[in-house]
Amino acid sequence: MISHTTNHTPNHTTNNTPSEQPRLTREQRIEQGKALRATVHRTSHAAFDPGPTRADPLALLDREDASRVQELLPIRYGRMAASPFTYFRGAALPMASDLAATPVTGLTVQCCGDAHLSNFGLFGSPERRLVFDINDFDETLPGPWEWDVKRLATSVEIAGRNNDYSAGTRRRVVLATVAAYRNAMIEFADLTTLEVWYAHADVAAVRNRFDAKADQARRKEIKHAMAKAHSRDHLGALSRFTAVRDGQLRIVADPPLIVPMDEVVEPGTDIVEVVEGMRTLLRAYRSSLEPERRTLLDRYRFVDLAHKVVGVGSVGTRSWMILMLGDDVRDPLFLQAKEAGPSVLEKFTSPSVYDNAGRRVVVGQRLMQAVSDIFLGWIRVEHGMDGRGRDFYLRQLRDWKGSASVETMVPSAMQAYGELCGWTLARAHARSGDRIAIAAYLGSGDVFDEAVREFADAYADQNERDHSALVEAIRHGRITAAPAE
C-alpha cells in the first residue's frame, strides 16, 4: 500500500516569521479600517453580477474530479443533487470562483474557505469540555475575510429556502447572522490579544444562546443533541464499525461507504506488506505531533484500516479510518486520515506556503479553532495504492462530535444557530487577522449586514440555477449520480 512516506517542512516564506515592518498603533489601525470605507464602500458587498464570462460551475467541478476516486463520484453527485443546500455544500470551488470577482478590503485572515452552516459543530476539547467551533478546514488558506462571511450568510439563506421560510424570515435570520459576526468583531477589537486567543464557546454558552430563543420541545432537542455528541466517542465507534472476525477485531464492511483494507487492495497483494506500509505511515505521522502526544500515540497498536466515504464536498477524496487498540478492546482509538489537496482558494489568491497540503490544513485549523484535536497531524504518502504521492492530515474520527440538523430547524433556532456561527467565525478571523481594522471598517451600523444579505439572496438564486443544471445533466446522462442515501 505504502512504500515511502515523508513529513516535509514548509516552503520558506515570510508568513512564518515575525514581520519586520513596524507595527501600527491601535489608533492607526482604526483609521486604516475607516479609510477603507471610502475605497471599498460597504454597500459594494451586495454586488453579484456573474455576467456571460462566468466560469461554468459543472466544468469546475469536473476538473476538481480528476484527482478523486472515480468510482465514488456518483455518490458525490447523488448527494449534491438532493437539494440546492446539498449542492451548495459540495460547490466550494464554483463559489470561490465567483467570490474572486467581488469587492474586498485587502485585509487578510486565515479563511476557512468553506464556512457554511454544516461545517460548524460540537466536539470534545482536550480538557474534556464540549465546545462549539468550525469543524472543517479542507479549504483553509489566508484570504479575504469577506469571502467566509458571504459563504456563511448565503448558506443561511439557502437553508432557509430549503426549510420553506418566508422571505421576511430569511431576511431576518441572515441579517442576524452577519450582525453577530460584525458585533463579535467589534467586541474582539476591544480585547487583548490573549483574551481573543482564549475565547471559545463551550456547551454552557451554546445552551444559553439557544435556550433564550427556543420553546420547550426545542430545548429538549438541543439537550438530546449534546448528549448524543457525548456518546460519539471511540467506544461508540467500536460498537458501530467493528466486529470480531476469525478471532480478530476488524472493521465491518458497508460498501461503498466503508470498505475494509483486505477488500481494497489488489488481488494477490501481500496483506503483511500492506500492514507494514500502514505502520510506516503512522511512524511518519507521529513525527508531526508534539513529543508528549507521540508518547500517547505509542501506547496504541495498529489493528485495521478501511476506506470511508465522508461528507458531501469530500466524496471522492481518499479518506481512511484507522483502528488502533491500547491495553485491550476496551481501549480503542479511531483515527481518520483524510486526503488534502490544494485549497479551492489557491486559484484566486496565492498558493499555500506549505509544500504539504495536509500541513496547510493542520496549521489553518490550529489558527482558527480555539482548541484542536490532540492527534491532529499530517503526512505525505510518496507512493500510494495508485502509485501517486498524496498528502493527508490525521485526526480522531470521533471525539464527542456532533452537528446540528439544519434541515429541521425552526426559524428561531436557525437564527440562534446563525448568530452562534457568526460569532465563531469572527473569533476565528480575529485570531489571525487585524481585528481592529476589520471592526473599524464594519462599524456599528448595519450597512455591511444589509449588503451581505442582498448578496446572499442573489447568490442563492444563482445556486438554484446551478443545482438545476446539475440535475439536468444527470437526467440527460452527462453526469452519473447514485441515489442519495
Image (cartoon, rainbow, N blue to C red):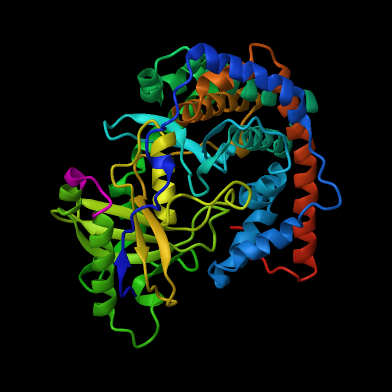
Q: Is residue 246 above or below residue 92?
A: below
Residue 221 percent across, percent down from the top left = 50, 29
363 or 82, which lies in front?
A: 363
- Please determine whether, in this image, residue 33 is positioned above or below residue 471: above
Left or right: 67, with 208 as reference point: right
**Image quadrant in which you'd find residue 41:** top right
x and y percent of residue 351 in the render? 53, 52
- State which quadrant residue 101 falls in: top right
Q: Nearer the viewer, residue 47 or 170?
A: 47
The residue at 65%/60% (across/down) is 78
Q: Quadrant of the C terminus?
A: bottom right
Taking the image as drawn, is residue 250 in sight?
A: no
On whether residue 13 falls in the magenta region, the answer is: no
* Residue at the extreme front: 21
Residue 253 placement (x, y as % from top left): 40, 67
State which quadrant residue 293 falls in: top left
Q: Is residue 354 left or right of residue 177?
A: left
Residue drawn where x is 52% and y is 24% of the image: 423
Q: Is residue 201 above or below residue 67?
A: above
Q: Residue at x 44, y 39 (%)?
A: 402
Name the residue nearer the viewer: 377 or 242. Answer: 377
Tell me residue 197's x, y (percent).
38, 25
Outermost residue on the right side: it is: 52
Apparent side of residue 173 relative to residue 191 in the rendered image (left or right): right
Q: Quadrant of the N terminus?
A: bottom left
**Residue at 41% from the left image edge and 21% from the top image edge:** 196
Q: Magenta stretch: residue 290 in it?
A: yes
Magenta residue span: 287-293
246 left or right of 17 in image: left
